Image: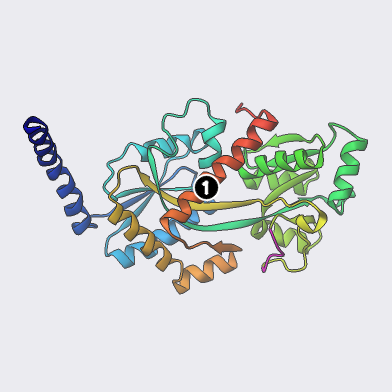
């Protein structure tokens, strides 16, 4: 018994400096510039949100927030880099849907999505519309299903790339309608949208903000919004749910940190992000860009990440989707 007490006392003594260091770090944080790793090329929505929120965080925290783009391998390179940085609250990563899809899609991830990384804050999302070219003759989901059954393997759907939300939502739509559509991946939404406008592909899920002008001027036809209810950005466009297909698709952005980042720092970051989302400049940019603000707690974002992993995992396994 005496030996056990001595061992317990020694263990407590050994752990005290580490715990004290974490508390001290949290008390002094932030004492130097922060970094946000964006695993995409500059110019996209995730990059825009990271820079917009990062700018507000800099003002609120009194420290510079530097955004670094580290694209490649479907975001794996940038996320892996962030996962291996010190867990001190000074390195974050701004991720999107692919972060959760890669858990199932990439068989040999160099990091564990939930073990090596910590949810910090969900920031916003871009609602998706399912669109087609006028020459397709499609007006509704019923038209799409009829055309797919009449001409198997003729209908195609474009995406931003393998494993992206547009890819997986297209696969899910095919599963739900009981049809086969050929997936055509592109390197980004821009090239895919160009081919949709040219009639080279049949349909595509994409951000409403980028599709809106083309739909309003008649260059594209909206088959439906992939939202639970009619979007405030597109109140006149019926949802897919109204047509009997409860499919929700969007592109979201959230901040994560290396696992082990002190809880006090994570909670502070979450609170500061929620505050930044209410800044007039952020509200204005979100409104103009068709972005929906998604402020919430750390726990809520963690639950959201787990639900996205489960959702995409099921789609990927059922469709037997692999990279390449």
Q: Residue 66 vs residue 254: left or right? A: left
* Residue furthest to the front: 1
Magenta-span inclusion, residue 323: no
SS label for mark 1: loop
156 versus 126 height, above or below: above
Residue closest to the eye, 17 or 216: 17
Would you identify the image quadrant in which residue 316 lies?
Answer: top right
For label 1, the residue is 96
Q: Residue 295 vs residue 23: left or right? A: right
Magenta-span inclusion, residue 231: yes
Identify the residue at horizontal 71%, vertical 35% (top origin).
184
Residue closest to the eye, 307 or 50: 307
Q: Which residues are magenta?
A: 228-232
Identify the residue at horizontal 56%, vertical 57% (top origin).
125
Instruction: Give how far across and how far down residue 319 sits, in percent.
Output: 70, 31
Q: Is residue 44 visible?
A: yes
């Amino acid at each position: 018994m005496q030996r056990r007490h001595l061992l317990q006392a020694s263990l407590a003594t050994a752990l005290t400096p580490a715990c004290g260091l974490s508390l001290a770090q949290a008390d002094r944080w932030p004492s130097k510039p922060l970094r946000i790793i964006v695993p995409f090329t500059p110019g996209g929505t995730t990059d825009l949100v990271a820079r917009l929120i990062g700018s507000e965080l800099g003002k609120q925290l009194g420290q510079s927030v530097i955004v670094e783009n580290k694209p490649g391998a479907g975001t794996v390179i940038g996320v892996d880099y962030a996962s291996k940085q010190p867990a001190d609250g000074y390195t974050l990563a701004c991720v999107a849907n692919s972060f959760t899809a890669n858990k199932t899609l990439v068989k040999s991830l160099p990091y564990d999505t939930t073990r090596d990384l910590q949810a910090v804050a969900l920031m916003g999302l871009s609602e998706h519309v399912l669109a087609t070219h006028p020459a397709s003759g499609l007006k509704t989901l019923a038209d799409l299903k009829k055309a797919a059954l009449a001409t198997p393997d003729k209908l195609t759907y474009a995406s931003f790339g393998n494993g992206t939300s547009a890819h997986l939502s297209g696969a899910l739509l095919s599963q739900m309608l009981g049809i086969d559509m050929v997936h055509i991946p592109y390197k980004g939404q821009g090239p895919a949208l160009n081919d949709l406008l040219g009639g080279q592909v049949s349909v595509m899920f994409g951000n409403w903000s980028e599709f809106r002008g083309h739909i309003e001027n008649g260059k594209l036809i909206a088959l439906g919004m992939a939202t639970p209810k009619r979007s405030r950005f597109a109140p006149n466009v019926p949802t897919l749910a109204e047509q009997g297909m409860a499919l929700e698709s969007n592109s979201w952005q959230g901040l994560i940190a290396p696992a082990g980042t002190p809880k006090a720092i994570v909670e502070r970051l979450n609170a500061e992000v929620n505050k930044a989302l209410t800044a007039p400049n952020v509200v204005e940019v979100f409104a103009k860009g068709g972005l929906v603000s998604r402020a919430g707690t750390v726990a809520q974002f963690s639950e959201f990440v787990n639900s996205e992993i489960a959702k995409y995992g099921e789609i990927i396994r059922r469709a037997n989707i692999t990279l390449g």
